Image: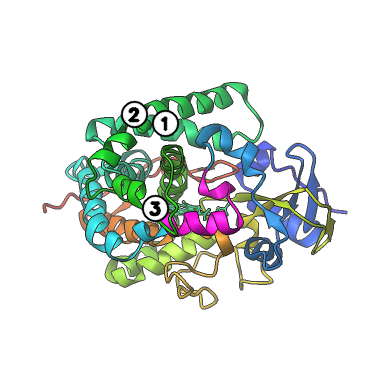
């Protein structure tokens, strides 16, 4: 049998895609001792776990995975409780709230960051833009003080380190738990204030939301805001960096997107397929379940390898090729932001922020291309993807001829 690479090895962290192929072809259901979970790598299996049509999976694993840093969030809920919570939060991320209130916030925050480097002719698109833009947008949507954005960014960094801490480094774990305390101390008084004096911001909307007589407690709202840091920040951060990393490596496709901004959604969808920001999502089995390669017992943790499923040649032709024009990737499912890749998951927990992410990407990438029409790689452009749980380029040094405007 072929040697099966370990997901915690340095070789895997450097490039997981060869290992993903081995998993899909030789070990589609693989017990992983260190994470005490079954790795699932084929598209049809990951899709089945996410869609969960027969109610075979729960998100009970999040009680140990994210509870210590976020508290009890929508991700841990199931059944009717989840459906009500979803109905409470989802409207704020689509329709008129998105169009009228938040598009201007997105435009403003993107422009502010670009103004920081547009006259210099060079930038690191990761440090100067991607790691800041989505988290600034969330803080601004929530109506938080601009002076607190730096603090928000620090919490964001600690939270994503906590969530990616697969090897269990105790210092990273402690820093994550400290963030939970600091975040609560900061947010709870603001939440109480917004209940008394609501504004038109997202936080006030969440505080006032009511469905079937149910409202969220202060703790619920705080946990949701904490989740937004990681769920809405890190993911969109890595998606934007990923789009530029992929396009800069494929100059003909970059030129096509520059000429026709209508191609940005395709570049986004193909980037989410080819280099998804979230590589691993865990579920817990509520029954014995049959998947390709065997049966998993009740109460087992299942790690869905999105990065592997998205490159399954049983689903996509020539899956290791980045091609924004590929015909086997559509951009027209339920939310119209979702493509049929698995980067936003599927089913009950399908990403609430998919449309917001799409808006951020379309506006952000458009503004960046306007400010850097001849953007090209700078010397030392060798972005390495970093991370195992989530992945994205560590740096993207670029050069361009400054334009006024
Ligand atoms: C859920 C990915 C952007 C908020 C999810 C899930 C994935 C995901 C994979 C499913 C988690 C699970 O099933 O366990 C992404 C990616 C994004 C993105 C790749 C960007 C490209 C955003 C944004 C927000 C957001 C901008 C901000 C509003 C959420 C929330 C959930 C979620 C609240 C939980 C939904 C639920 O449990 O019902 N996202 N996300 N995401 N996402 Fe996103």
**Quarter location, residue 315:** bottom right
Badges 2 and 3: C-beta atoms under 8 Å apart? no
| In the displayed structure image, the side of residue 256 where residue 157 appears, left or right | right
* Circle 2 or circle 3, nearest the eye: 2
Which residue, given by chain and number where applicable, does mark 1 sit on? 155
Give the magenta-colored segment's residue range: 73-88
Q: Look at the image and say whether residue 274 sits in the magenta stretch.
A: no
* Circle 3 or circle 1, nearest the eye: 1
Location of residue 141 with respect to 322 vertically, above or below: above
Badge 1 marks a residue whose secondary structure is helix
Badge 3 marks a residue whose secondary structure is helix
Q: Disc 2 versus disc 3: distance between alpha carbons?
A: 22 Å
Residue 382 appears in the rendering: no
Residue 190: x %, y % from top left: 30, 34
**Quarter location, residue 318:** bottom right
Outermost right residue: 1
**Which residue is found at the position 47% from the left and 47% from the top?**
231
Q: Look at the image and say whether residue 84 sits in the magenta stretch.
A: yes
**Quarter location, residue 132:** top left
Q: Which mark, residue 240?
A: 3
Outermost front residue: 213
Give 47 or 267, whichever is nearer the viewer. 47
């Amino acid at each position: 049998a072929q040697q099966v690479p370990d997901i915690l090895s340095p070789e895997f962290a450097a490039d997981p895609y060869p290992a993903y192929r081995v998993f899909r072809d030789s070990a589609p259901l693989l017990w992983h001792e260190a994470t005490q979970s079954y790795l699932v790598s084929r598209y049809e299996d990951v899709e089945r776990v996410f869609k969960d049509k027969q109610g075979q999976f729960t998100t009970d694993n999040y009680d140990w995975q994210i509870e210590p840093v976020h508290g009890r969030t929508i991700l841990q809920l199931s059944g009717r409780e989840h459906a009500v919570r979803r109905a409470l939060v989802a409207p704020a991320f689509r329709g008129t709230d998105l169009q009228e209130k938040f598009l201007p916030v997105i435009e403003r925050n993107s422009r502010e960051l670009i103004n920081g480097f547009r006259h210099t002719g060079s930038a690191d698109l990761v440090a100067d833009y991607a790691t800041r833009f989505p988290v600034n947008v969330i803080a601004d949507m929530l109506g938080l003080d601009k002076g607190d954005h730096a603090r928000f960014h620090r919490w964001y960094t600690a939270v994503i380190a906590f969530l990616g801490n697969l090897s269990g480094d105790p210092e990273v774990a402690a820093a994550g738990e400290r963030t939970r305390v600091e975040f609560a101390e900061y947010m709870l008084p603001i939440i109480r204030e917004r209940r008394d004096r609501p504004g038109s911001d997202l936080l006030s909307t969440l505080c006032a939301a009511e469905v079937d007589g149910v409202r969220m407690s202060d703790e619920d709202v705080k946990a949701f805001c904490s989740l937004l840091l990681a769920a809405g920040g890190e993911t969109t951060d890595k998606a934007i960096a990923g789009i530029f990393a992929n396009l800069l490596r494929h100059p003909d496709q970059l030129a096509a997107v520059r000429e026709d901004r209508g191609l940005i959604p395709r570049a986004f969808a193909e980037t989410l397929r080819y280099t998804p920001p979230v590589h691993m999502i865990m579920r817990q089995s509520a029954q014995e379940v049959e998947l390709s390669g065997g049966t998993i017992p009740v109460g087992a943790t299942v790690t869905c390898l999105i990065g592997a499923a998205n490159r399954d040649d049983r689903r996509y032709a020539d899956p290791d090729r980045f091609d924004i024009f590929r015909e086997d990737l559509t951009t027209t499912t339920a939310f119209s932001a979702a493509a049929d890749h698995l980067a936003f998951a599927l089913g009950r927990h399908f990403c609430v922020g998919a449309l917001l992410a799409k808006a951020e990407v379309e506006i952000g990438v458009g503004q960046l291309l306007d400010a850097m029409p001849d953007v090209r790689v700078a010397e030392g452009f060798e972005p390495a993807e970093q991370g195992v749980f989530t992945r994205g380029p560590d740096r993207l040094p670029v050069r361009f001829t400054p334009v006024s405007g």
